[in-house]
Amino acid sequence: MIDYHIHTHHSIDAEGSPDEYCKQALKLGLKEICFTNHCELDPLRDDNLIRINGEIKPLSQSLLFQLQNEVFKLKEQYAKKGLNIKFGLEVGFFSGIEKRLKEIADGLEIDYLLAGIHCLEHICIDSSKECNRYFQNHTAEKLLEDYFNNIQLLIRSGLFDAVAHFDVYKKYGLNFYGEKVRLFNQEWVYQIFKLMIQNEVGLEINTAGLRRHNEFHPSAEFMKLAKDAGIKIITIGSDAHRIEDLGKGVKEAIEYARSYGFERAYMFFKRHKFPLDIR
């Protein structure tokens, strides 16, 4: 089993040290994990932060190198115990991020670069404290339009290995808009999946939705479209922000992928992908 979406206490909204996650991974029988702490870079927001040595500081290249070095030490230590550890980041994508991301990530030995849409109009729709500021001023139709326009930009940037939590707008959008938020344009999303194939960008099966509204990200209607479009690269992650959530739903995610005809999940090393047979 693998888990390719993990936040440690270095992410300001998460808890638990990398070493604690590694110990838990061994207990759970995980074979490979990838740490993907938040990398938020929007200059119009105040969450471009990282926690290092218990202190919250502005995110910088030097602090990412500190984080990388911590992960690499654990990688060597736990390899002897049968656990493979990878170093990744989860980037909050926004239009115009390219230059800043290339600058801050220059020289890092990243295995896996995951990206998701956390914010629209610089408002975090993935936050219970902020989401209503966006929702109250936009229809469900406008939310979907803005969101999927940004997904297309993320894919076309050519910077990322996979799209995180493809329909994360449901996290709080379902409660606000109700079922209207499910009424997406299927042909549009089908073409987005085709764009992912062209750019070799993977689709993450994120298990966090199971803990909130009893369905994966992406939900069933997206999975069918993804398979019909020809998506082959999938990754699997718990989006753990607490140690007890590590690996949660991963077995179920594998079964979920199989049920739509997917035969492989993918692992990464220095941005190169390698298949894991899940048949």
Image: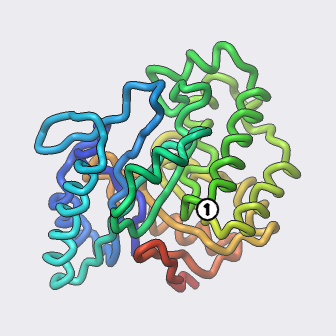
Given residues 12 and 132, the one toward you in this image is 12
Residue 212 in the image: state x and y as whole percent. 49, 40
**Label 1 crowding class (10 Å Cα cut-off): few <14, some 14-19, many 20+?**
many
Residue 114 on image: x %, y %: 49, 57
Residue type highlighted by circle 1: Leu
- Along the line of sight, the residue nearer the viewer: 170 or 59: 59
Secondary structure of the residue carrying numbered label 1: strand
Extreme residue toward the right, this view = 187
Dividing the picture into quadrants, the one containing residue 112 is bottom left
226 to the left or right of 276: right
In what quadrant of the picture does the N terminus appear? bottom left
Res 134 → quadrant? top right
- For the point 69% across and 24% down, which residue is it? 177
Front position in the image: 102 or 273: 102
Query: Coloured how?
Result: rainbow
Residue located 54% across and 75% down the image: 265
Q: Nearer the viewer, residue 158 or 175?
A: 158
- The residue indicated by pointer 1 is 203
Examine the rendered structure and indicate whether residue 263 appears above or below residue 235: below
Q: Position of residue 135 (x, y in %)?
A: 63, 20
Number of numbered labels in the structure image: 1
Q: Residue at x 54, y 23 (%)?
A: 131
Which quadrant does the C terminus fall into?
Answer: bottom right
Judge left or right: residue 64 versus residue 69. right
Percent across and percent down for residue 228 are: 81, 68
Residue at 24%, 57% (x, y): give it: 65
